[in-house]
Amino acid sequence: MVLKNASILVVDDDADVLTALRLLLKPLVKEVFTEKNPNQIISLIERTHFDIIILDMNFSGLVNTGNEGIFWLNRIQKQKPETSVILMTAYADIDLAIRGLKEGASDFLMKPWKNEKIIETITTILSKKTATSLQKDGFNTSNTEIIGDSEVMNDVFVKLEKVAPTDANVLILGENGTGKDLIARALHDNSNRKNKPFIKVDVGALTSSLFESELFGYKKGAFTDAREDRKGRFEAANGGTLFLDEIGNITLGQQVRLLTVLQNRQVTPLGSNESIPVDIRLICATNEDPKVLANEKRFRKDLIYRINTVDITVPPLRERGTDITELSHHFASLYAEKYNKNGFSFDPGFISKLKKHDFPGNVRELQYVLERAVIMTDGDVLKPEDLVFSSIERSTTTKSFETTSLNLDDIEKNAILTVLEKHKGNVSKSAKELGITRAALYRRLDKYEL
């Protein structure tokens, strides 16, 4: 459910509160209704659907239940259990608010409130409702971490729902770190092949000598170290899904071999003359535009047509708006549990600083930033000073890599920076050009604090 399509009811006997919340929320959501008299709640929810009700806990009424907020919370749940309720209370009534959570409220806010906190709370609740709705509709994201409620991500969800049940080949496009592998997994988990293998291959990291043996397998004695028969990834994925990541990095020769297999739907292991039929659904991913590659004579157009029955573009994090807040909560919770820390809340400046960063590394960068913040902070509130962003992207855009130093470390560091700039931060391509493995490059990045 997109934030702008939400309908919200605010119930409070303070006219100033109603006015303030209406002015805050009106530009962000579809509809904002306000009501001073809680006795009108039932008739309102019978006539109009509300995604969220923001409910004050204390009115000047004569309901003898100990607290009017709890009373009306129970009435709303009985009448419209699908409606989320956010309780509003003064600090002195925080125990009652906690009681309200136990009785089914989605969250509570304390007066005086912070606008950022209200928007953040509403966004989180709506996102959870969206995920639940997708699962009720039969679309499963429980095995992945696809999180988001932005309009661009909802467009991705709509496409996933339509494409996943089919056997269509899918090409996933997007920058590094956007979560293309999660999209591939979601396609498999919601297909008719979900109980069959899901095999992922980073073809961009395969050398020419390994490409055929890894994908198509080999027979004993096919080459010096072939001591036994081995299935290739195509055969291992038979009946299921084969995910070829970084497809834009393979050579023209490898493309010809791959195209032949896809056309014939059979593989011939190295050292064998017998072809083996394979039944796979193909999903590919790349961070490069295949049309540009084709125009530069680096990618075969007939292979593009073969792998691209449907394409799905995963948006960069900088275009996903409030998703940054929800993802940050998710990662903070994840790493709090991993490192045995209590749950965290966010200082308003923390989210503000996150939103000002352009995240060239996308969701993957956000994940590492939150992990570092959780590890390094001493309190239970994450603050702006807990955020430290990687210097890789800033360093690779400075054009200041030349050095007169003959120190070997300086030479190696600047060589790494130069290659990273050339490949726009793509670690796989950079490692390949430097003649080292990705793991070795990551170790050097850590060594030089890049």
Image (cartoon, rainbow, N blue to C red):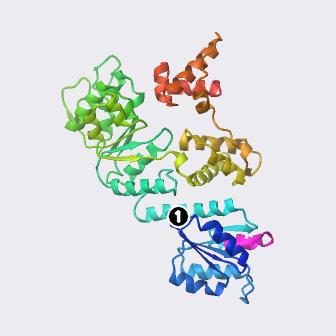
Whether residue 101 appears in this view of the structure is no
Name the residue located 61 percent from the left edge and 40 percent from the top edge. Answer: 368
Residue 81 in which image quadrant: bottom right
In front: 400, or 203? 400
Whether residue 419 appears in this view of the structure is yes
In front: 16, or 262? 16
Coordinates of residue 92 in the picture (x, y in percent): 81, 71
Seen in the image, is 247 located left or right of residue 11?
A: left
Residue extending farthest top: 406
Q: Quadrant of the C terminus?
A: top right
Residue assigned mark 1: 4
Name the residue located 59 percent from the left edge and 26 percent from the top edge. Answer: 443
> What amino acid type should be assigned to the residue bearing mark 1?
Lys
Name the residue located 74 percent from the left edge and 72 percent from the top edge. Answer: 89
Q: Is residue 371 inside the magenta stretch?
A: no
Coordinates of residue 76 in the picture (x, y in percent): 59, 80
Seen in the image, is 21 located left or right of residue 420?
A: right
Q: Main secondary structure of the magenta part?
A: helix
Coordinates of residue 23 in the picture (x, y in percent): 65, 69
